[in-house]
Amino acid sequence: MKILVVGATGNLGRQVVRRALDEGHEVRCMIRNRERAQFLEQWGAQLFVGDLREPEAFESMLTEIEGVAMVASALANRDYRDKTNSIETVDNTGIRQFLDASRAAGVQHLVFTSILRCDEFPDVRMMAIKRDTETYLERIGMSYTVLRLSGFMQGLISEYALPIMEKKPVRISGTPSAIAYISSIDVARFVVAAFTTPAAKNKIYGVSGLQGWLPREIIDLSDELAGVRQVPKVSILSAGQKRINELIAKLFNPNLLELLRFSEVYATGDSYEADMEETCKVFGVPKSEIEDVETYLRDYFTLLKRRLREKNYQEPKVRSPF
Ligand SMILES: NC(=O)c1ccc[n+]([C@@H]2O[C@H](COP(=O)([O-])OP(=O)(O)OC[C@H]3O[C@@H](n4cnc5c(N)ncnc54)[C@H](OP(=O)(O)O)[C@@H]3O)[C@@H](O)[C@H]2O)c1
């Protein structure tokens, strides 16, 4: 199948490209910066420079495309110089226009990545946009699969592992939610399988890891694996600090404000865990092959410590090896 990956340079997008190529699909990638996307070309994908804010190019980008993996998002955009790359212009307007263009181009199937429980937070803009996009997909009548995701394990590195290695405080806010983190490599399996799974057509599935983790549990595990032998410092973000952060974000980068508001979704005490029994069965992915948080973090710290040893560091001067 000829698949277009939108968001191909992202954490998940690159794994979707890798997986789709490995499974013998022909892959085209929408990318914004050719230089930063060279590795995708080296893997064997075709590059197409474009932007979800520039609909004029959608038609030519979609020529001969049979499947679209829509895994782009501007939520993590922290580029202060590019304030217009926001969840409004990209996740909302841009993706919607791209869905219209895909339908008009006769795309056979589109996979869209959403967020678990997005229908429960109408006041959080990112969640509302995800839910609206799901509804829009249903309405325009093209063949689709929606995957509602939990959180990616890869995010645990900057949030927990690195601060702990650097003996810096880990920040927690609100009433922590248990999150069943999943590796983006595993998510990519479901995204690619959706193109060849008739039972997943026009349906919404939750995709997560198999076990929910609270921040305290991740902190204790990271501390043990890091072996820094220091009780990790945890700083609880007060309501006042949150307000100040929001005001600063509002001044400098409106997208950062949305990111802060979005992070509150994971501070409500609700758990983010999907029914993986059902999802794995439908997509033909064995549950036993889903990576767990402990293995992921153990591998990370083993690699990190080996690299530090090779460099003969005494004190951890840390950078993510991933
Ligand atoms: N990360 C999580 O824990 C998580 C949890 C639940 C759901 N999800 C969903 O999973 C999907 C992938 O997330 P991710 O964490 O992999 O995202 P990511 O790493 O932030 O990647 C975002 C991708 O979108 C692209 N993009 C941004 N602005 C664009 C624009 N104007 N035009 C075209 N492309 C643009 C980026 O390209 P550049 O490299 O050029 O910026 C990048 O390739 C998203 O749908 C997200 O909502 C993620």
Image (cartoon, grey):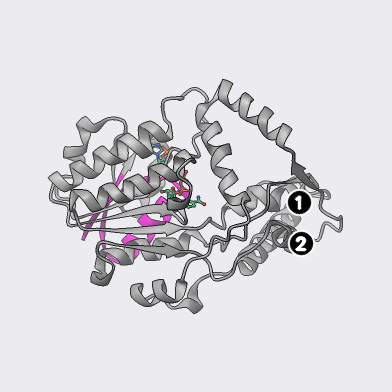
Residue 178: which quarter of the image?
bottom right
- Quadrant of picture, ligand 1: top left
Q: Position of residue 288 (x, y in %)?
A: 50, 79
Question: Can you say which quadrant of the picture contains the N terminus?
Answer: bottom left
Q: Nearer the viewer, mark 1 or mark 2?
A: 2
Element type at marker 2? helix
Query: Which residue occupies 23% across, 70% down?
Result: 198
Element type at marker 1? helix
Q: Is residue 90 above or below residue 42?
A: above
Query: Which residue occupies 31% across, 31% down?
Result: 53
- Front residue (pair 194, 320): 194
Indicate yes or no whether the magenta region holds residue 11: yes
Which numbered circle lies on residue 164? 1
Which stretch did the figure color magenta? 1-29
Query: Which residue occupies 49% across, 35% down?
Result: 77
Q: Earlier in the sequence, mark 1 or mark 2?
A: 1
Residue 293 falls left or right of residue 317: left
Crowdedness near tag 1: few (<14), some (14–19) or many (≥20) residues, C-alpha within 10 Å: many
Q: Amino acid at mark 1?
A: Ile
Q: Is residue 195 above or below residue 158?
A: below
Q: Position of residue 213 (x, y in %)?
A: 64, 63
Q: Position of residue 313 (x, y in %)?
A: 79, 49
Most distant residue in the right direction = 230
Residue at the disc numbered 2: 220
Residue 266 visible from this viewpoint? yes
In three-dimensional space, the C-alpha distance between marks 1 and 2, rounded to whole angstroms, equals: 10 Å
Q: Amino acid at mark 2?
A: Asp
Q: Position of residue 183 (x, y in %)?
A: 52, 61
- The number of numbered badges drawn on the structure is 2
Indicate yes or no whether the magenta region holds residue 99: no
Residue 162 falls left or right of residue 206: right
